[in-house]
Image: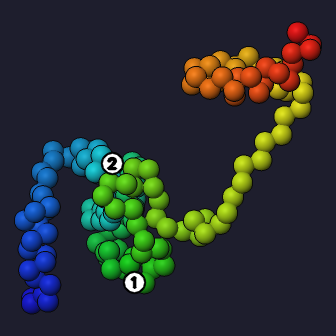
Amino acid sequence: MKLERKDIIEKSLSEYGAIIVVENLEEAIKIVNRLAPEHLELCVEEPFSLLASVRNAGAIFLGQYSSEPVGDYYAGPSHVLPTGGTARFFSPLGVNDFLKKSSIISYSKKALYEVKDDIIEFAKAERLDAHANAIRVRFEKES
């Protein structure tokens, strides 16, 4: 078969490609989780049995008929995937990436009093004296 981008493919394979031979599927999954591939095709007899073990992959294609182009062009998930092993700590682009969120924290005086010493210790460990003081001053008159 003639590929229009044959030169690019050959260069990519020679400079970045690898064949990794493993003893079993368990070893393969360990390597997958370390490499955190952008695309992972599980072309095995029972791909769903391995799915729970895969922690780090941008898109996971299950079985012989779920190849990468199905996901990229037709099945619906985002085509914007974490590359270069970043699937260890990033997810594919999704709706939540376009939502602005805020954290909301509300403690009562009693609730803060019960944990104030722990917070002060965390702040001291990080050498953030002003953070420790922001908690301490709220209870100075009571001590």
Q: Position of residue 114 (x, y in %)?
A: 81, 20
Residue at (83% x, 21% y) in the render:
137
Location of residue 134 with respect to 74 vertically, above or below? above
| Callout 1 crowding tier (Cα within 10 Å): few <14, some 14–19, many ≥20 | few
Residue drawn at x 77%, y 47% is 104
Q: Secondary structure at mark 1?
A: helix
Vertical placement of 73 versus 107: above or below? below
Instruction: Give the residue at x 39% y 83%.
Output: 73
Q: Coloured how?
A: rainbow
Q: CA distance from mark 1 to mark 2?
A: 25 Å
Density class for disc 2 (Cα within 10 Å; few <14, some 14-19, many ≥20) is some
**Residue 74, image quadrant:** bottom left
Q: Amino acid at mark 1?
A: Tyr
| Closer to us: 2 or 89 | 89
Which residue does the numbered mark 2 point to in the structure image? 33
* Residue bearing mark 1: 73
Q: Is residue 62 visible?
A: no
Which residue occupies 48% across, 79% down?
A: 76
- Residue 1 position in % (x across, y down): 9, 88
Q: Secondary structure at mark 2?
A: helix
- Please give left or right for residue 96 compared with residue 1 in the image: right
Q: Quadrant of the C terminus?
A: top right
Residue 19 visible (yes or no) = yes
Image position of 23 (left or right of 25): left
Residue 12, relative to residue 74: is it above or below?
Answer: above
Label 2 is placed on what type of residue? Asn
Residue 16 appears at what percent x and percent y?
Answer: 14, 61
